[in-house]
């Protein structure tokens, strides 16, 4: 495209992918996802971005701030007042910045791991159904330079709107792939020479005393039930030393503490 | 009280403190606060709890689960159907468990620090206006056995309903007190022989290399602007080693990583 296209009719078919954002969050979008806000829009268009954008929808007053980023032969940019944007999306769009991304083909988990003997750090999410936790873990995975995230079938979609937001956009940058189950993640770890680590309050050793393996898969499960016993039995069980009587951390927070420990040598070298 | 009191009129004056919960979240409650859900109710009634309960409001089917906890000479327990509870509170009360706590007199910050030369770990919050972050930090302070939390005047109320919930109840158990400003927190640190530590992406040394001081005040500021320069100039500046290009952690997460490091020796000994 060369110039943005002004639209003032909420029923304009070019805005179809922006309709009823919240309802579609629940039922899916046929390979599309919604990006909201400036930080994540810039990540979507950053060099080496993982996903293509199908279109961008901005309030007219936001266009000057993005014209350098979006001018060129990229996807169409539509301009519509915030009232039109809100009418299309079905809730108030305060910041006036939306885009539709295309998921593309999801990679296979194997493709995301640096081959041995290079160092590798992969986060494995098992049964995480809370978008805040998944988004927070992506943010932490990015902060500590994890190579990839692997998800089991139960873990929710990192490209759900709220997960992208909570991830501070990291869901758009950290490569992820899905396996059928937690057991499949452990099979993958074995084939790719990753030491499986399970974070659990009942861990036999504390995280602090672990010499970080050069290649690791960090498994995280839900806060209540935790990781299934059958998975933990195949992994090295680690606990975070906590005060007596309050052994409770949010799973994304626990993951951050473990990633900080595991990445220490890589990030300081 | 001896037995719970059934109430079926949403306008019953005994339920006055439960009215319009969300609106009052914004304007205050004359020394009261609202507790929601089983975990936090149990903390409110745990031995050594910091706050008194004024009353409890349960859906009748929840009473058997709490009768052991609440029977005796405690505050009155009212039973009302969830429809009545929701009508009073002004939003759906799915779990059927509410209570009103009494703030009591707030302690002075000095009163919460173990006297030197005993070890001490205090979290100092400066300008934190997001209830999720404040709640998350209380949860992390409890998990790592911090002795107290000090708040500056701008930091939001830890007894706000959402902060209590996100804290997993830790806002009811970790002692906190307020000082006029961040500078006042640093004056207190000096008087009480606490080493002031400032967590900031621009820190001169990484957290990992810090030998945890026996007595420390960990200062945390907002994610965007961070701690004011005038405060950081009086503290030891620490950064968390992160991957290049994504030096962004949630403030509660960054606090957890620092607390984990600072508490390590205490919790493992």
Image: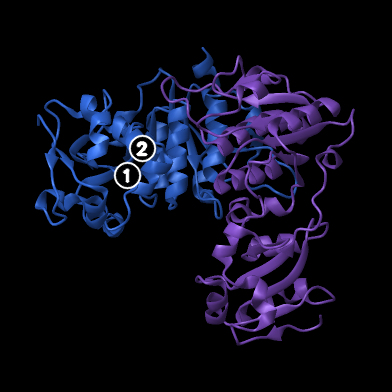
Chain colours: A blue, B purple
Q: Where A56 falls versus B236 (above or below)? A: below
Identify the subunit bearing mark 1: A
Quick one: label 2, few (<14), some, or many (20+) residues within 10 Å?
Answer: many
Q: Nearer the viewer, residue B28 or B234?
A: B28
Residue B145 in sight in this render: no
Residue at which label 1 appears: A159
Mark 2 or mark 1, earlier in chain: 1
Q: Nearer the viewer, residue B69 or B173?
A: B173
Q: What is the tally of numbered marks visible in this picture?
A: 2
Identify the subunit bearing mark 2: A
Query: With A194 as the anchor, is A3 left or right in this view?
Result: left
Query: With B68 as the anchor, is B36 left or right in this view?
Result: left
Q: Secondary structure at mark 1?
A: loop
Q: Nearer the viewer, residue B159 or A87?
A: A87
Give the x, y percent position of residue A166: 43, 42
Give the x, y percent position of residue A208: 65, 29
Residue at which label 2 appears: A171
Quadrant position of the C terminus of chain B in the picture: top right
Residue A95 in sight in this render: yes
In three-dimensional space, the C-alpha distance between marks 2 and 1, rounded to whole angstroms, equals 7 Å
C-beta proximity under 8 Å, tags 2 and 1? yes
């Amino acid at each position: 495209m060369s110039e943005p296209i002004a639209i003032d009719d909420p029923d304009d078919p070019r805005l179809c992918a922006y309709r009823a954002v919240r309802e579609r969050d629940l039922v899916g979008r046929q390979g599309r996802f919604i990006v909201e806000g400036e930080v994540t829009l810039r990540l979507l268009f950053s060099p080496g971005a993982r996903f293509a954008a199908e279109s961008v929808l901005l309030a007219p007053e936001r266009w000057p701030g993005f014209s350098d980023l979006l001018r060129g032969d990229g996807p169409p940019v539509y301009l519509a007042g915030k009232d039109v944007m809100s009418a299309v999306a079905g809730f108030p769009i305060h910041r006036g910045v939306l885009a539709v991304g295309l998921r593309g083909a999801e990679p296979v988990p194997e493709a995301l791991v640096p081959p041995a003997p290079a160092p590798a750090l992969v986060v494995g999410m098992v049964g995480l159904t809370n978008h805040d936790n998944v988004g927070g873990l992506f943010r932490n995975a990015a902060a500590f330079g994890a190579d990839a995230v692997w998800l089991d079938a139960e873990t929710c979609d990192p490209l759900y709107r709220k997960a992208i937001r909570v991830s501070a956009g990291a869901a758009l940058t950290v490569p992820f792939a899905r396996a059928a189950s937690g057991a499949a993640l452990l099979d993958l770890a074995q084939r790719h020479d990753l030491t499986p680590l399970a974070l659990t309050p009942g861990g036999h050793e504390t995280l602090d005393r672990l010499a970080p393996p050069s290649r690791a898969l960090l498994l995280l499960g839900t806060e209540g039930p935790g990781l299934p016993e059958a998975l933990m039995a195949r992994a090295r069980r680690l606990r975070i030393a906590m005060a007596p009587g309050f052994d409770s951390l949010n799973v994304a927070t626990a993951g951050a503490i473990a990633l900080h420990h595991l990445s220490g040598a890589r990030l300081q070298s």
